[in-house]
Amino acid sequence: MRNLTPGDLIALGSLALATITTVIGGILWYANAEKKKYAAERDFAHIRRNQEQMQLGLNTLLQELDRRFDVVERDILEIKSTLKIDKSH
């Protein structure tokens, strides 16, 4: 068996260091990719819920406007009947 020279030890140390840093870099890259994926899914869910809430608000607003217009229409009809004005006017 041959004795290891200082150059061989340096080469083996460099190889080990390069391998370890590559593995750690891969793990960190994967962890960051998963974080970004989770953040994108969370943001999408927030946007979807926000859109649903806006739709619900618009539906409520339109129902209220419809109710108020019905009241106004009834009041106008009542005024016309009181003044004996033809309904077609």
Image (cartoon, rainbow, N blue to C red):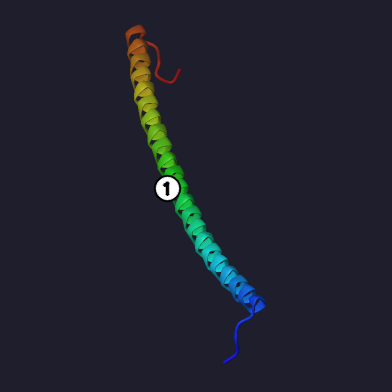
**Which residue position holds label 1?**
45
Q: Residue at x 43, y 45 (%)?
A: 48
Closer to us: 6 or 78: 6
Q: Picture coordinates of residue 89 (x, y %)?
A: 45, 17
Position above or below: 52 against 27: above
Q: Picture coordinates of residue 38 (x, y %)?
A: 45, 53
Q: Residue at x 52, y 64 (%)?
A: 24
Q: Picture coordinates of residue 34 (x, y %)?
A: 47, 58
Q: Picture coordinates of residue 15 (x, y %)?
A: 60, 74
Dot 1: what SS?
helix
Position above or below: 25 against 15: above
Closer to us: 74 or 55: 55
Q: Taking 58 as reference, is 11 left or right?
A: right
Q: Taking 42 as reference, is 15 left or right?
A: right
Position above or below: 72 against 19: above
Give, as a three-letter code, the residue at label 1: Ala
Q: Taking 74 as reference, is 3 left or right?
A: right
Q: Taking 38 as reference, is 23 left or right?
A: right
Q: Residue at x 36, y 21 (%)?
A: 68
Q: Quadrant of residue 9?
A: bottom right
Q: Quadrant of residue 66?
A: top left
Residue at the farthest top position: 83
- Give the class, few, some or many, for how many residues have Cα within 10 Å of label 1's Cα (few <14, many ≥20): few
